[in-house]
Amino acid sequence: MKLYYAPGACSLAGRISLHEAGFPADFEKVDLKTKFTEQGYDFTAINPKGYVPLLVLDDGDSVTENIAVLEFIADREPKLAPGGPLGRTRLLEMLSYLSTELHIAFKPYYHGASDAEKIEAGEAVAKRLDVIAERMHELYLFGPRFTVADAYLFVMLRWAKAFGVRMSPEMLAYFERVAERETVRKALAEEGLA
Ligand SMILES: N[C@@H](CCC(=O)N[C@@H](CS)C(=O)NCC(=O)O)C(=O)O
């Protein structure tokens, strides 16, 4: 498998999850401004959507969209998904929330918004984090076991910290707990973020 990524971008969730699953993979960096890969290929020719993550499978097929990439990994390594009769539904519910509500709320930070718009975005992000914090009552999002959704939330919390978004002490403690995982440290180091 090969994951196309940009350092610290949402594709970091896929890298962490691949490491958690113990799946061997190659990683190729994409310059999101020029849309060229580190090996000199036009990324838009590889992925017409022009954004990461892109996971290319061993048979040449490929998967885009964080929700699908993370679901793919959890499907092949079930310890990375919550258990129980509603486990898969809960995972999709959480991944959808992280993608379509939380991730999207950061957009103003990345698209040259005014200071006022950034303050508004910070509030929107903080509110969504509060909703997640209310649901978290053990070590990780779904209990004592780390799942692919935790990998995604960790990336969003890295951004939130970088942009100075308000975060509850519980969320901060969760962030630090995840940051200490061996796979997370490895992923951060590989992306030059340690
Ligand atoms: N809908 C996509 C969005 C992915 C996304 O926003 N990727 C960002 C990095 S976090 C990116 O590559 N942006 C570059 C661009 O859109 O040109 C997903 O959920 O996977």
Image (cartoon, rainbow, N blue to C red):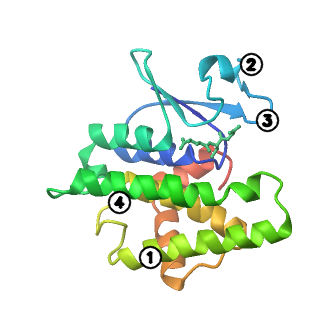
Task: Residue 20 in the image: state x and y as whole percent.
Answer: 39, 48
Closer to the N terminus: mark 4 or mark 2? 2
Closer to the N terminus: mark 1 or mark 4? 1
Closer to the N terminus: mark 4 or mark 3? 3
Task: Residue 82 in the image: state x and y as whole percent.
Answer: 26, 57
Mark 4 to mark 2 CA distance (whole Å): 36 Å
Q: Residues within 10 Å of mark 1 (few under 14, many from 20)?
A: some
Q: Is residue 68 left or right of residue 39?
A: left
115 or 22: nearer the eye? 115
Q: Are marks 1 and 4 in contact (CB under 8 Å)?
A: no
Query: What residue appears at the point 54 percent right and 82 percent down from the top-left corner?
Result: 168
Mark 1 to mark 3 CA distance (whole Å): 34 Å
Mark 1 to mark 4 CA distance (whole Å): 15 Å
Closer to the N terminus: mark 3 or mark 2? 3
Check disc 2 and give the amino acid type.
Answer: Gly
Indicate the secondary structure of the residue bearing disc 1: helix
Check disc 1 and give the amino acid type.
Answer: Ala
Mark 1 to mark 2 CA distance (whole Å): 42 Å
Badge nearest the viewer, 1 or 4: 1
Residue 33 tag number: 3
**Quarter placement of the N terminus:** top left
Disc 2 designates what residue?
40
Indicate the secondary structure of the residue bearing disc 2: loop
Disc 4 designates what residue?
146
Indicate the secondary structure of the residue bearing disc 3: loop
Closer to the N terminus: mark 1 or mark 2? 2
Check disc 3 and give the amino acid type.
Answer: Lys
Q: Residues within 10 Å of mark 2 (few under 14, many from 20)?
A: few
Residue 133 tag number: 1
The answer, for residue 22, to whether it is visible in the render is: no
Closer to the N terminus: mark 1 or mark 3? 3
2 lies above or below 136: above
